[in-house]
Image (spheres, grey):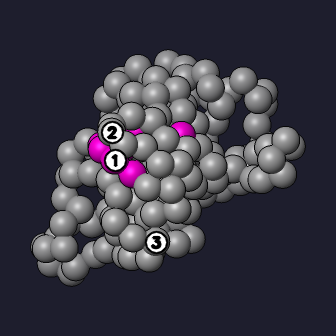
Amino acid sequence: MKAIGLRIALGNESDLTTPTSTQNYPLGGVVDVEDSSKKTIKKYMYVKSHDTLSANGIYILNFSGISGSEVLTALPTDTSADKGVTYYNMPGVAEVAVTSGYYCFICIQGTTTVSAAGSVTDQHACKLTDGAATVTTEGATTVTAYTVGINRATRTNAGTTAFELIGQDKWALQYTAP
Protein backbone atom coordinates (compact mmCIF):
# COMPACT_ATOMS: atom_id res chain seq x y z
CA MET A 1 0.00 0.00 0.00
CA LYS A 2 1.30 3.45 -0.90
CA ALA A 3 0.06 6.86 0.22
CA ILE A 4 -1.40 8.92 -2.62
CA GLY A 5 -1.60 12.67 -2.09
CA LEU A 6 1.10 12.63 0.58
CA ARG A 7 2.49 16.16 1.02
CA ILE A 8 6.15 16.29 0.08
CA ALA A 9 8.86 18.95 0.15
CA LEU A 10 10.24 20.14 -3.16
CA GLY A 11 14.02 19.72 -3.44
CA ASN A 12 14.39 22.45 -6.05
CA GLU A 13 11.76 24.63 -7.76
CA SER A 14 13.21 23.69 -11.16
CA ASP A 15 12.03 20.11 -10.51
CA LEU A 16 8.48 21.30 -11.35
CA THR A 17 9.49 21.82 -14.98
CA THR A 18 12.22 19.19 -15.40
CA PRO A 19 11.00 15.65 -16.21
CA THR A 20 13.50 12.89 -15.43
CA SER A 21 14.05 9.26 -16.39
CA THR A 22 14.65 8.37 -12.74
CA GLN A 23 12.16 8.68 -9.90
CA ASN A 24 13.18 11.45 -7.48
CA TYR A 25 10.03 11.77 -5.34
CA PRO A 26 7.29 9.41 -4.11
CA LEU A 27 4.69 8.82 -6.84
CA GLY A 28 1.44 10.54 -5.88
CA GLY A 29 3.27 13.04 -3.68
CA VAL A 30 1.72 16.53 -3.65
CA VAL A 31 3.56 19.85 -3.51
CA ASP A 32 1.88 23.21 -2.77
CA VAL A 33 3.59 26.17 -4.45
CA GLU A 34 2.76 29.83 -3.83
CA ASP A 35 2.84 32.23 -6.78
CA SER A 36 4.03 35.30 -4.90
CA SER A 37 3.16 37.67 -7.77
CA LYS A 38 -0.49 36.53 -7.89
CA LYS A 39 -0.85 35.51 -4.23
CA THR A 40 -2.28 32.13 -5.23
CA ILE A 41 -1.39 28.53 -4.46
CA LYS A 42 -1.00 25.79 -7.06
CA LYS A 43 -0.87 22.07 -6.34
CA TYR A 44 1.29 19.59 -8.22
CA MET A 45 1.38 15.78 -8.08
CA TYR A 46 4.40 13.65 -8.93
CA VAL A 47 3.53 11.07 -11.61
CA LYS A 48 4.92 8.76 -14.29
CA SER A 49 3.96 9.57 -17.89
CA HIS A 50 2.03 6.90 -19.82
CA ASP A 51 3.12 8.28 -23.18
CA THR A 52 4.60 11.50 -24.55
CA LEU A 53 2.75 14.35 -22.86
CA SER A 54 2.14 17.61 -24.70
CA ALA A 55 2.90 20.89 -22.95
CA ASN A 56 -0.42 22.35 -21.71
CA GLY A 57 -2.17 19.02 -22.30
CA ILE A 58 -4.79 17.93 -19.77
CA TYR A 59 -4.72 14.29 -18.75
CA ILE A 60 -6.34 11.93 -16.26
CA LEU A 61 -4.24 10.66 -13.37
CA ASN A 62 -4.90 6.95 -12.87
CA PHE A 63 -3.93 5.27 -9.63
CA SER A 64 -2.61 1.71 -9.98
CA GLY A 65 -1.14 -1.02 -7.82
CA ILE A 66 1.80 -1.62 -10.18
CA SER A 67 5.08 -0.96 -8.40
CA GLY A 68 6.85 2.02 -9.95
CA SER A 69 3.67 3.15 -11.69
CA GLU A 70 1.33 3.93 -8.79
CA VAL A 71 0.29 7.20 -10.44
CA LEU A 72 0.16 7.25 -14.25
CA THR A 73 -1.17 9.77 -16.72
CA ALA A 74 -3.78 8.74 -19.31
CA LEU A 75 -6.06 10.29 -21.91
CA PRO A 76 -9.76 10.62 -21.08
CA THR A 77 -11.66 8.02 -23.09
CA ASP A 78 -15.34 8.61 -22.36
CA THR A 79 -16.71 11.84 -20.96
CA SER A 80 -20.26 11.23 -22.19
CA ALA A 81 -23.33 11.01 -19.98
CA ASP A 82 -23.62 7.25 -20.67
CA LYS A 83 -20.50 6.10 -18.87
CA GLY A 84 -21.34 2.46 -18.18
CA VAL A 85 -18.61 1.15 -15.90
CA THR A 86 -16.06 3.76 -16.96
CA TYR A 87 -14.63 5.88 -14.19
CA TYR A 88 -12.30 8.85 -14.04
CA ASN A 89 -9.70 9.93 -11.58
CA MET A 90 -8.20 13.37 -11.05
CA PRO A 91 -7.41 15.63 -14.05
CA GLY A 92 -3.97 17.22 -14.28
CA VAL A 93 -2.11 19.52 -16.66
CA ALA A 94 1.37 18.83 -18.03
CA GLU A 95 2.86 22.32 -18.02
CA VAL A 96 5.88 21.14 -20.05
CA ALA A 97 6.35 18.40 -22.66
CA VAL A 98 7.26 15.03 -21.10
CA THR A 99 8.90 12.00 -22.69
CA SER A 100 7.06 8.67 -22.42
CA GLY A 101 7.90 6.81 -19.20
CA TYR A 102 9.46 9.86 -17.54
CA TYR A 103 8.64 11.16 -14.06
CA CYS A 104 7.31 14.69 -13.66
CA PHE A 105 5.09 17.05 -11.72
CA ILE A 106 1.57 17.64 -13.08
CA CYS A 107 -0.54 20.63 -12.00
CA ILE A 108 -3.67 19.33 -10.26
CA GLN A 109 -5.12 22.59 -8.94
CA GLY A 110 -4.71 26.30 -9.59
CA THR A 111 -4.17 28.75 -12.43
CA THR A 112 -2.43 27.20 -15.42
CA THR A 113 -2.55 27.09 -19.22
CA VAL A 114 -4.40 24.33 -21.10
CA SER A 115 -5.06 23.37 -24.70
CA ALA A 116 -8.64 24.03 -25.84
CA ALA A 117 -10.25 21.93 -28.57
CA GLY A 118 -12.08 24.94 -30.04
CA SER A 119 -13.71 28.21 -29.08
CA VAL A 120 -13.99 28.90 -25.35
CA THR A 121 -15.50 31.84 -23.49
CA ASP A 122 -14.10 33.63 -20.46
CA GLN A 123 -15.65 32.41 -17.18
CA HIS A 124 -17.31 29.37 -18.79
CA ALA A 125 -17.01 25.90 -17.29
CA CYS A 126 -14.95 23.40 -19.32
CA LYS A 127 -14.81 19.61 -19.45
CA LEU A 128 -12.38 17.09 -20.91
CA THR A 129 -12.43 16.23 -24.61
CA ASP A 130 -12.88 12.50 -25.36
CA GLY A 131 -9.61 10.87 -26.39
CA ALA A 132 -7.62 14.12 -26.48
CA ALA A 133 -5.46 16.17 -24.12
CA THR A 134 -7.74 19.21 -24.47
CA VAL A 135 -10.74 20.83 -22.83
CA THR A 136 -13.97 21.93 -24.45
CA THR A 137 -16.53 24.44 -23.24
CA GLU A 138 -19.67 23.32 -21.47
CA GLY A 139 -21.33 26.43 -22.90
CA ALA A 140 -22.30 27.99 -19.60
CA THR A 141 -21.01 29.45 -16.38
CA THR A 142 -22.68 26.63 -14.41
CA VAL A 143 -20.35 23.98 -13.00
CA THR A 144 -21.52 20.41 -13.69
CA ALA A 145 -20.33 16.93 -12.70
CA TYR A 146 -18.08 17.00 -15.80
CA THR A 147 -16.42 20.35 -15.07
CA VAL A 148 -12.63 20.19 -14.59
CA GLY A 149 -12.05 23.94 -14.55
CA ILE A 150 -13.06 27.46 -15.51
CA ASN A 151 -11.73 29.15 -18.63
CA ARG A 152 -10.07 32.53 -17.95
CA ALA A 153 -9.91 34.02 -21.47
CA THR A 154 -12.02 34.02 -24.63
CA ARG A 155 -10.64 32.19 -27.70
CA THR A 156 -12.33 31.94 -31.08
CA ASN A 157 -10.46 28.80 -32.18
CA ALA A 158 -8.37 25.91 -30.84
CA GLY A 159 -5.19 26.75 -28.92
CA THR A 160 -3.93 27.46 -25.44
CA THR A 161 -5.94 29.39 -22.89
CA ALA A 162 -5.60 30.61 -19.30
CA PHE A 163 -7.44 28.17 -17.07
CA GLU A 164 -8.38 27.62 -13.43
CA LEU A 165 -8.08 23.90 -12.70
CA ILE A 166 -10.45 23.22 -9.81
CA GLY A 167 -8.66 20.13 -8.49
CA GLN A 168 -9.77 16.98 -6.71
CA ASP A 169 -11.90 18.65 -4.06
CA LYS A 170 -14.53 19.53 -6.68
CA TRP A 171 -13.91 16.70 -9.15
CA ALA A 172 -16.77 14.18 -9.43
CA LEU A 173 -15.45 10.61 -9.48
CA GLN A 174 -18.25 9.62 -11.89
CA TYR A 175 -18.47 5.93 -11.16
CA THR A 176 -21.14 3.35 -11.93
CA ALA A 177 -20.78 0.02 -10.12
CA PRO A 178 -20.38 -2.97 -12.48
Q: Residue at x 53, y 48 (%)?
A: 153
Residue drawn at point x = 86 percent, y = 43 percent: 36
- Eyeballing the image, is 34 above or below 2? above
How far apart marks 1 and 3 lie (CA) works out to: 15 Å
The image's mark for residue 119 is 1
- Judging by the rendered image, the residue that carries numbered circle 3 is 141
- Residue at 39%, 76% in the rendered image: 144
Question: Circle 2: is it few (<14), some (14-19), or many (20+) Cα within 10 Å?
Answer: few
Q: Which comes sooner in the sequence, label 1 or label 3?
A: 1
Work out whether mark 2 precedes mark 1 in sequence or the reverse, and give the earlier one: 1
Q: Residues within 10 Å of mark 1 (few under 14, many from 20)?
A: some
Q: Left or right: where does residue 112 sit relative to residue 49?
A: right
Q: Please name the amino acid that badge 1 sits on.
A: Ser
Residue 66 in view here: no
Residue 126 % position (x, y): 40, 60
For label 2, the residue is 157
The magenta segment is: 113-120
